Amino acid sequence: MTTYHMNKKEREIKNQEELREILKQGKYAVISMCRDNEPYVVTLSYGYDRGKNALYFHSASKGLKIDFIKHNPNVCATVIEDRGYIMNDCDHKYRSVVFWGEMLIVENLEEKKHGMEVLLNHLENNPKTVKEKFLKNEENYNKVTILRLDIKELTGKSNLIQK
């Protein structure tokens, strides 16, 4: 991939821990995909697995998103920490990450379980309740598609500097 410099270098987040913290705090990612020069964007809630440097998503097993991933697993995505628009300044306070990676459809049952665990622990206050309700047995895991986005490159930007 061609690399570009950031126009406002003072806003670049270089600290890897800060970039990971944005992923840890976020709840949804906007994913961009491409198939035969046709773009597609989808917003998905996720779970962040720091150890694997990956995001996990759940999905229906059929649909446009799955078709795009099967055709081209390379994706670009963003997670934004919105701190609000500043009225009368034409400015916005935020931190964001943009990342590139490969989106994979998880087939292995044990990894599906792991992915759901990561997802529920990331999003839910009481993941046990949701697991007991929707994931009572292994058959239930076969009804859901788990996606894993392996992050290959991660950049970030912040506009939290006080004027």
Image (spheres, rainbow, N blue to C red):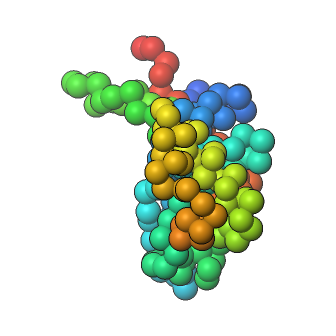
Instruction: Give residue 103's quadrant in the image.
Output: bottom right
Left or right: residue 94 versus residue 21 is left
In front of the other: 14 or 77 = 77
Q: In the image, what residue occupies the spot 61% across and 82% down?
A: 71
Instruction: Give residue 146's quadrant in the image.
Output: bottom right
Q: In the image, what residue occupies the spot 54% across and 48% down?
A: 131
Q: Outermost residue toward the bottom?
A: 36
Label tally: 0
Return the x and y of residue 4 as percentages of the image width and height: 65, 51
In front of the other: 12 or 128 = 128
Asked whether residue 156 is in view, the answer is yes
Return the x and y of residue 3 as percentages of the image width and height: 69, 54
In front of the other: 94 or 81 = 81
Instruction: Give residue 82's quadrant in the image.
Output: top left
Asked whether residue 33 is in view, the answer is no
Relative to 100, say whether 53 is above or below.
Answer: above
In front of the other: 110 or 31 = 110
Left or right: residue 123 versus residue 106 is left
Relative to 161, say whether 120 is above or below.
Answer: below
Q: In the image, what residue occupies the spot 63% across and 45% down?
A: 118
Relative to 87, say whether 114 is above or below.
Answer: below
Relative to 163, say whether 1 is above or below.
Answer: below
Q: Outermost residue toward the left?
A: 88
Q: In the image, what residue occupies the spot 53% across and 60% down?
A: 58
Q: Outermost residue toward the right?
A: 51
Specify the quadrant that holds the C terminus: top left
Return the x and y of residue 63 as percentages of the image width and height: 45, 78
Specify the quadrant that holds the N terminus: bottom right
